[in-house]
Image (cartoon, rainbow, N blue to C red):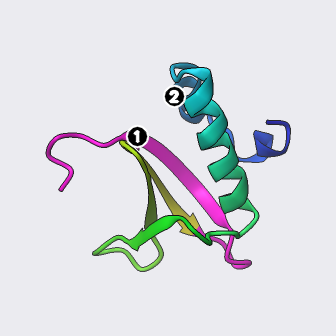
Amino acid sequence: MGILKNIMTSKIEKFLRKLNSRRRKILGGTLLRMTRGNFEGLHVKKLEGFANRYRVRKGDIRIKYSLDKNNKAAEIEIEWRGDTTY
C-alpha cells in the first residue's frame, strides 16, 4: 500500500490492521481507486447537511470522504456500520 501512504492516518492504519487479510486487500483496493478519482461501481451517497461530504459502503464498513479540487477522495475516515447507522 505504498501509494496509499499519502492518505494513511494512524486511525486508518489501525482500522486496517484489525481486519483479516481478505478484507484489508478489498478495502485497500477501494481506497486506492477513490484516491485516484475512480468511483465507478462503488456505492456512493452524498451525506445530508454537508456541502462536500460523501460515503462509500463496502459491506459493513463505511468510508466517509470529501472531494478535492481534482475530484479525488481526501479527508478519509473509515468506520464500522453500527446498528443505528440507518
State left or right for residue 80 relative to residue 20.
left
Find residue 12 and report its image quarter: top right
Q: Nearer the viewer, residue 43 or 74?
A: 43
Which residue is disc 2 drawn over? 15
| The quadrant where residue 73 appears | bottom right
> Which quarter of the rendered picture does the C terminus lie within?
bottom left
Horizontal and vertical percent position of residue 57: 42, 55
- Mark 1: few, some, or many residues within 10 Å (few <14, many ≥20)? few
Residue sitting at x 72%, y 52%: 32
Callout 1 amino acid: Glu
Boundaries of the magenta span: 67-86
The question of residue 49 being in magenta is answered with no
Label number found at residue 79: 1
The image position of residue 77, as x and y in percent, is: 49, 47
Circles 1 and 2, Cβ within 8 Å, touching? The answer is yes
Q: In the structure shown, which secondary structural element does the residue marked by tag 2 occupy?
A: helix
Which residue sits at x=68%, y=39%? 8
Asked if the stretch drawn in magenta spans residue 81, the answer is: yes
Callout 1 secondary element: strand
Q: Residue at x 14, y 46 (%)?
A: 84
Q: Earlier in the sequence, mark 1 or mark 2?
A: 2
